[in-house]
Amino acid sequence: MDNFENSFKNSESNNTNSFSKSIKLFVKSHPKLYSISVFIITIFKWRFYIIRKQIYKIFDFKSDRKNLMINIGGGYFFRRHWYVLDYISNTYDRPKGLIDYNFDLTSDKPFPFENNSVGFFFTSHVLEHIPQEHCQHIFDEIYRCLKPGRAIRISTPDFDLAYETYGRGQLSSLIPEYKEPTEEQTFMHFFAGYLRDKVSPEDVKKNYSVMKKENFADYYAKQIPRKGLENFSNNHINWFNYEKIYKMLRKSSFTNIYRSTPQGSKFKEMKGSGRNTGFDSTYPQWSIFVEAIK
């Protein structure tokens, strides 16, 4: 009897899975229907997250104020006890209910936090979208706001990895998400996206062979015009490797700085996978992870 019931349940489960797969295949085979479905699901998903977030705030905000945890540039990030600092603009539209501190990272203004008041800062794949002239101020503000003994965790595309992989002619294989018609365009997409269809592949090859790595990176990053920057805010306009991040953190007075790995934080508060609900889940295969303790 038990075997019969198990067989029936397995058969029922297989039929359900088969029906579900058929529905998914049907929807995906109709582009317009698929787009509408994704749009509807996304709307309901973020409305659900916003409602949950507001409920959590009612119960948690008072206690969370004693141990603020801030995701800088988190956008759609949603995790209980964490708050998002991001900037809503015409070209970077985000649901307002998900942004807790609407703050422009390029304003060079003080962060909206008191000295020594923030428990943890986390930022993932944000700094490469910020002009270099504003980045040191961001690090300085992070240090000012952090509590002693607490940390900042940083993740950005790893320029060293891209630089070395380009030299082997394998960059498009490493980052298929940014693949362009040529390896040189793919390389520009990685750290100077605005220029990917504006530079000569021959010039990129030549400069790569004669310039030092940092000079090569700065040469192209500095060509990106600042006027109208908001019109290509999704492009990478800056580059980082461990040495560059280390020097900037040191300049901000951090002394305990170390290279980390995906899910390798020394703090349980910054562990857990998930693109929008966790940490270190944005292209970890070609990212660099750095942590610094105040």
Image: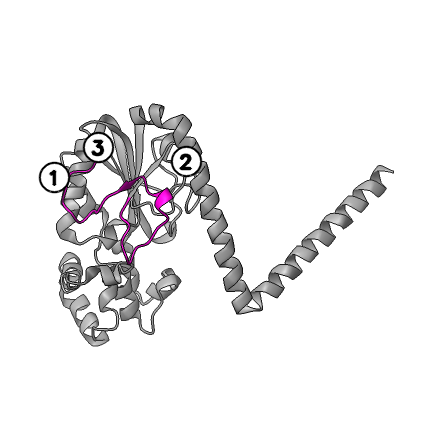
Measured from the top left, where is residue 213 in percent x and y? 17, 59
Crowding near pointer 1: few (<14 within 10 Å), some, many (20+)? few
Q: Which residues are magenta?
A: 86-113
The quadrant of the rendering that contains the N terminus is top right
Question: Which residue is at the far right?
Answer: 1
Measured from the top left, where is residue 128 in percent x and y? 24, 53
Determine the residue positioned at 17% across, 54% down. 131
Mark 1 lies on a secondary structure that is helix
Determine the residue positioned at 25% across, 37% down. 258
Vertical placement of 258 versus 93: above or below?
A: above
Q: Nearer the viewer, mark 2 or mark 1?
A: 2
Q: Amino acid at mark 2?
A: Gln
Gap in Å between the C-alphas at discs 2 and 3?
A: 21 Å
Residue 247 seen in the figure: no
Residue situated in front as seen by the camera: 28 or 175: 28
Residue for badge 1: 251
Q: Residue 78, located in which quarter of the rendered image?
A: top left
Residue for badge 3: 113
Residue for badge 2: 54
For this view, does 57 lie left or right of residue 195? right
Q: Amino acid at mark 3?
A: Phe
